[in-house]
Amino acid sequence: MRRATLISLLVFGSLLVLVLLMLGQKAERGMRRMDLTQFDLAAVDHISIRGTNPIELAREGDLWRIAGRPANANSVKALLGSMEHMRSSDLLVDGGQDLSEYGLDEAQAQHVLLKGSGKKLAEFALGKATGGGAYVLVDEAVFLVRKVFPRTFGRKLSDWHELKLFDVKLDQVERMIIRPAEGAPWSLIKDDAAWRLEPKRDLRLDQDVVRRLVGGLVNARAGEIRLVDVNFAKAGLEKGYEVLRFEGKAGLSGELHLGAPSGENDVFAQVAGRDDLFVLRGYLAKNLRKVPEDLRSLKPMDLEPAKAVALQIRDGKAKLSLAKEEGAWRVLESSVEVPADFKLEAVMVEGRLRALVGAKGIEMVTGEAGSESGFGQAEISVSLLGGETVGMQIGKKIKRDKKELRIVQGNADDKLYLMPQRTVERLLGMLPSFKRPAMPPRPAGGMPGQIDPSVLEKLPPEVRAKILKQLGQR
């Protein structure tokens, strides 16, 4: 090949490569991409949002705050989590157009700025939600970004604030003091695992109800925080308010003040030591405003089902006696003939004992209502290991507001209680109520899900009980 020809080919090749490179760069510029994920989220210490719901969030150590107040950690976490999806190649507009249809004009857009150590890490604007994501404006270009939603950035002010009033766990609390707006103060004190009342009263506490009360205080969450036109006097929080206080080890304490109504059901509240005005939802305020009588146990029976060795039920002429021998329950006596194919289900007996312990009255009987109890017609008794026998007497029926109730008395105390007739009927169930449920017919061809009764009998009682319950619900 001649030297001149070779030189011409080399020049032509160089020019071709240059042209291709230029075309490639032009194509790349026409296919713009947006990526705001190229920074460490842990470096973010300031978040500013301008728009319908403006907010300024600042990180202090591991905590986020709004003007010094605790911020809702979950709301901030959701916002930062959205930044992991802030990338897109779906370019819709490249500047110079009306952006109102995308919700990115000044009247609609949310302008977001993230900083770290005073330096800008990311800046963008959010518009309308669409197609599993949102329109995002970056450097005058509009992109469709998936898995990013405007509501994550445009929350109401209350949703940015931490509305859980105390950072305490129930098992840390050892005392709760209640100082009502009127009347004498009283306390609940935890001894070992049980709570007691102080000053002492002739009142048996329902430990579950007490735990719900104390837990309701330490886990209290406001419905909203008032930051405009705050007036504590008008909110009933300068005098005449109710005080709920908890205390624990190592100086642990917290105090909530309940004031005047806020609207129809809600109540104004303040945490001692804070200048913030909160609003508690009506149901929470009602659950916190208790008197000692509200904590009374309405369970007539006190026994440990695991210690039971015999169960006797009598309802008029109907009688049933069951006994536990060598770990198995059997029928000792029944006022109705026991069918030859009858199989007593131990799980049903154990369930009846638990139901007996858990049965609650609706109130304690006082005054003339209990003068004629009508006891003697129906009763339930349980013999325990060691020879002790405890029981429940069931008396006359009382009608109230179209509901049938029965007077009952158990071994827990000497009080009389009103118990719903439905509850009593379940407790007085005779022989058929202890029968082992019939197994469903074996499907033809051995379909999946069939249960062999012989296998069922070998299962632990609690497992067998769950299976029988599920079968009974089908």
Image (cartoon, helix red, strand yellow):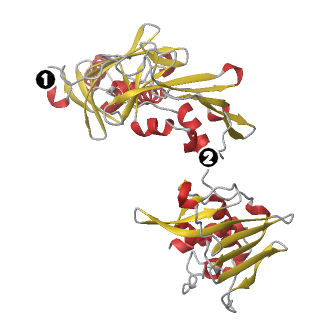
Quick one: 457 or 158, which is closer to the camera?
A: 158
Q: Give the amino acid type for the residue marked by disc 2 in the picture.
A: Asp
Residue in the picture at 51% in, 71% down: 473
**Could you classify mark 2 by the number of other residues whose Cα lies within 10 Å: few (under 14), some (14-19), or many (20 or more)?**
few
Quick one: 68 or 220, which is closer to the camera?
A: 220
The extreme left residue here reads: 98
Compared across the picture, whether 23 is left or right of 464 comes to: left
Residue in the picture at 78% in, 76% down: 323
Compared across the picture, whether 125 is left or right of 170 comes to: left
Residue 71 higher or lower than 436, as above or below: above
Which quarter of the figure has residue 317?
A: bottom right
Give the Cα separation between the discs numbered 1 and 2: 64 Å
Which quarter of the figure has residue 189?
A: top right
Q: Is residue 19 visible?
A: no
Q: Earlier in the sequence, mark 1 or mark 2?
A: 1
Q: In the rendering, at what x and y percent does residue 349 appear?
A: 69, 71
Residue 239 higher or lower than 365, as above or below: above
As drawn, the label of residue 97 is 1
Residue in the picture at 61% in, 41% down: 211
- Is label 2 in a helix, a strand or a loop? helix
Q: Is residue 466 visible?
A: yes
Query: Are dots 1 and 2 in contact, CB under 8 Å?
Result: no
Residue 126 higher or lower than 201, as above or below: above
Q: In the rendering, at what x and y percent does residue 258 appear?
A: 45, 27
The extreme right residue here reads: 386
Q: Give the amino acid type for the residue marked by disc 1 in the picture.
A: Gln
As drawn, the label of residue 208 is 2
Quadrant location, the N terminus:
top left
As drawn, the label of residue 86 is none
Compared across the picture, whether 246 is left or right of 21 comes to: right
Between circles 1 and 2, the one closer to the viewer is 2
Quick one: 41 or 394, which is closer to the camera?
A: 394
